[in-house]
C-alpha cells in the first residue's frame, strides 16, 4: 500500500491533473492521495496559497475583496470546466472561498491558517470528484476525520503523538482516500497549518501512521540531482539516498522536500521516493535507511549562500573556562540561531544565516565581545556560502577531503573554513559567495566526472 503525494505544480492545471489520474490508475497500491493546492501553471503564475495570503491580508486591512476572491475561484473553475467535473463543485468551492471573509478577526489566532488551508482543502474535493468521475472508487476525507490532530501552533503545527493510533485506522477504509495536505485540526477543532510547503509533512505522517510500504512524493523533477541543475549542466539524478544524506543536502540548498517531512517516514521506517509527474516512468530518487547500490563516497554536492561569520581571537582562549558558553549566551539573548562553529586554538568563528543578524544586534555582539569577553580581535565576514559534499560512505573512504580541496585549489578557490561532523556524513566548506558556483562545478567534476 502506498501513500502518494502530489505537489502544487502537479495539480496546477487540467493537463497536469490528467497525468495525475493516469498515475493513480496505473497502480492499485496507491491508496492514500495527499494533495497540495494548485501551484504555478507557468513561472509568472501565482500559487493559490499565495493568492489566499493576499486575500487574508486584504480582509484584515479592510481592502476590496472581490477581485482576489474571483481570481481564486476562477483558478478552480477553469480546472473544473476543462475536466468536465460536476459543475456543482464550483458552487461548493465558491461558497467556501467567500465564507472566509465572514470569519471573526478578533481573538482568532487561526484566521490566517484557515485562509491558507482552503487551497488544499478545496483541491482535495476537486481531485476526489475528478477521480470518481473517471471510474475510481475515491472519496475526500478531511484531516479531522482522518485523525490528524495537531498542536495549537499556528503556521507551525506539529502532530500530537496520540494521532498516530487514530490515523492507523485509515487502513480500514475501502477505495482511494484523497486527503488535503498542509494542515491538521487542533484538539479544540481549529484549522492549524504546518509551515509553508507542509503538504509533504502530511504525506509523511500518513505513511508512517498507516505503515505504508512506500511514500511517493510527486513533484516536477526526476528526483534529486547530484548538484543543482542551475549550476552544473545536466547533473545526474541520484538513484538512492539515505535519510541522513537527504537531510544534509536539503540543509544547503536542495529544497525538493520539506525538512520536517523526513522525520515521520524515517521513524516509521517507510521508504520514500521522489518522482516526476511529468515523467512517471523515471525511477526518481529513493530515500532509504541504508543504501544498497551506490557505493560512491559522495552522493551529492549542495551549496547555499547568505551566510556570515563572526570571528574572534583571544590569546589563550583554550584555557579560559566558560568562554564558549559566554559567546553563545549573547547569541541566545539576542535570539540568534547559529549554524556552525569552527574553531582554532585561539580563535573561534560562528557561522549564522544572514537573516539572523541586524545592524543593532551586530553592534551589541561586537561591543560585548570586546568589552566583556576582552577578545583581542573581532570581525564579521559577510557574503559567505556553504558548500557541502555529502555521502555516508565517506567514512569508509580515505582521501575524500583531499580530492575536494585539490579541486578547489586547482580552481583558485580560497576555503575560508572547513568543518566535518563526527558522523562523517558531510564535509562543509565555507567560501566567498562569488566562488560558490565555481566551487560546486569543480567538485562535481572531481567526484562524478573523473
Ligand atoms: N500550498 C502550501 C504552500 O504553498 C503547502 C504545500 O504546497 O505543500 O506552502
Image: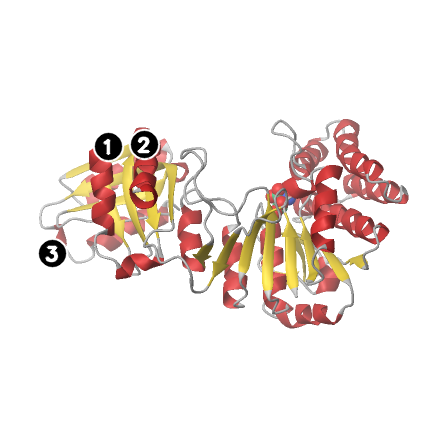
Q: Residues within 10 Å of mark 2 (few under 14, many from 20)?
A: some
Image location (x, y in percent) of residue 405: 22, 42
Q: Separation of disc 2 and disc 1 at Cα?
A: 8 Å
Residue at screen point 47% across, 53% down = 239
Q: Are marks 2 and 1 in contact (CB under 8 Å)?
A: yes
Tell me if 269 is positioned left or right of 199 in this view: left
Q: According to the image, label 2 marks what residue?
A: 438
Residue at screen point 60% across, 66% down = 213
> On screen, 357 above or below 200?
above
User: Considering the numbered disc 3 on the image, is that residue within a helix, a strand or a loop?
Assistant: helix
Q: Nearer the viewer, mark 3 or mark 1?
A: 1
Residue at the farthest left position: 316
Tell me if 122 is positioned left or right of 269 in this view: right
Q: Quadrant of ligand 1?
A: top right
Image location (x, y in percent) of residue 258: 53, 50
Tell me if 141 is positioned left or right of 271 in this view: right
Q: Earlier in the sequence, mark 3 or mark 1?
A: 3
Instruction: Answer yes or no: disc 2 within 8 Å of ligand 1.
Output: no
Q: Earlier in the sequence, mark 2 or mark 3?
A: 3
Residue at screen point 83% across, 53% down = 132
Q: Are marks 2 and 3 in contact (CB under 8 Å)?
A: no
Q: According to the image, label 1 marks what residue?
A: 411
Tell me if 224 is positioned left or right of 31 in this view: left
> On screen, 289 above or below 250?
below
Instruction: Please identify the quarter of the rendering in which residue 424 is found.
Output: bottom left
> On screen, 89 above or below 383?
below
Which of the labelled discs sits on residue 319, or is there none?
3
Q: Residues within 10 Å of mark 1 (few under 14, many from 20)?
A: some
In the depicted view, which residue is nearer to us: 25 or 252? 25
Q: Nearer the viewer, mark 2 or mark 3?
A: 2
Q: Residues within 10 Å of mark 3 (few under 14, many from 20)?
A: few
Amino acid at each position: 500500500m502506498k501513500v502518494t503525494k502530489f505537489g502544487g505544480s502537479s495539480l496546477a492545471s487540467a493537463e497536469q491533473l490528467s497525468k495525475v489520474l493516469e498515475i493513480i490508475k496505473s497502480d492499485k497500491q496507491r491508496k492514500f492521495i495527499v494533495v497540495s493546492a494548485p501551484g504555478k501553471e507557468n513561472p509568472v503564475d501565482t500559487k493559490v496559497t499565495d493568492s489566499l495570503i493576499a486575500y487574508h491580508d486584504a480582509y484584515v486591512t479592510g481592502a476590496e475583496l472581490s477581485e482576489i476572491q474571483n481570481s481564486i475561484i476562477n483558478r478552480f473553475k477553469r480546472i473544473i470546466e476543462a475536466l468536465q467535473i460536476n459543475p456543482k463543485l464550483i458552487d461548493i468551492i465558491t461558497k467556501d472561498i467567500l465564507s472566509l471573509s465572514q470569519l471573526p478577526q478578533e481573538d482568532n489566532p487561526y484566521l490566517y491558517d484557515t485562509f491558507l488551508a482552503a487551497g488544499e482543502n478545496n483541491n482535495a474535493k476537486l481531485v476526489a470528484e475528478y477521480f470518481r468521475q473517471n471510474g475510481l472508487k475515491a472519496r475526500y476525507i478531511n484531516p479531522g476525520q482522518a485523525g490528524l490532530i495537531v498542536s495549537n501552533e499556528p503556521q507551525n503545527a506539529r502532530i500530537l503523538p496520540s494521532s498516530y493510533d487514530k490515523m492507523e485506522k485509515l487502513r480500514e477504509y475501502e477505495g482511494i482516500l484523497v486527503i488535503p495536505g498542509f494542515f491538521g485540526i487542533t484538539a479544540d477543532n481549529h484549522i492549524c497549518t504546518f509551515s509553508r510547503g507542509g503538504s509533504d509533512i502530511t504525506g509523511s505522517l500518513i505513511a508512517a501512521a498507516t505503515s505504508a510500504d512506500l511514500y511517493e512524493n510527486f513533484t516536477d523533477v526526476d528526483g534529486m540531482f547530484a548538484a543543482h541543475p542551475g549550476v552544473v549542466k545536466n547533473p545526474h539524478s541520484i538513484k538512492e539516498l539515505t535519510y541522513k544524506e537527504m537531510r544534509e543536502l536539503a540543509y544547503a540548498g536542495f529544497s525538493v522536500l520539506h525538512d520536517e517531512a523526513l522525520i515521520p517516514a524515517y521513524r516509521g521506517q517507510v521508504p520514500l521516493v521522489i518522482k516526476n509527474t511529468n515523467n512517471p516512468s523515471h525511477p526518481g530518487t529513493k530515500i532509504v535507511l541504508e543504501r544498497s547500490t551506490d557505493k560512491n563516497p559522495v552522493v551529492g554536492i549542495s551549496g547555499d549562500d547568505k551566510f556570515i561569520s563572526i570571528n574572534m581571537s583571544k590569546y589563550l582562549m583554550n584555557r579560559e573556562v566558560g568562554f564558549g558558553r559566554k559567546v553563545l549566551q549573547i547569541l541566545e539573548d539576542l535570539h540568534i540561531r547559529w549554524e556552525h562553529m569552527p574553531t582554532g586554538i585561539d580563535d573561534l568563528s560562528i557561522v549564522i544565516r544572514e537573516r539572523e543578524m541586524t545592524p543593532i544586534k551586530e553592534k551589541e555582539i561586537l561591543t560585548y565581545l570586546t568589552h566583556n569577553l576582552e577578545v583581542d580581535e573581532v570581525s564579521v565576514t559577510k557574503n559567505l556560502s556553504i558548500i557541502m559534499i555529502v555521502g555516508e560512505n565517506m567514512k569508509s573512504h580515505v582521501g575524500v577531503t583531499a580530492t575536494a580541496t585539490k579541486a578547489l585549489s586547482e580552481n583558485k578557490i580560497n576555503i575560508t573554513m572547513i568543518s566535518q561532523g563526527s558522523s562523517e556524513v558531510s564535509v562543509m566548506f565555507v567560501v566567498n559567495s562569488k566562488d560558490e558556483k565555481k566551487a560546486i562545478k569543480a567538485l562535481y567534476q572531481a567526484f562524478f566526472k573523473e
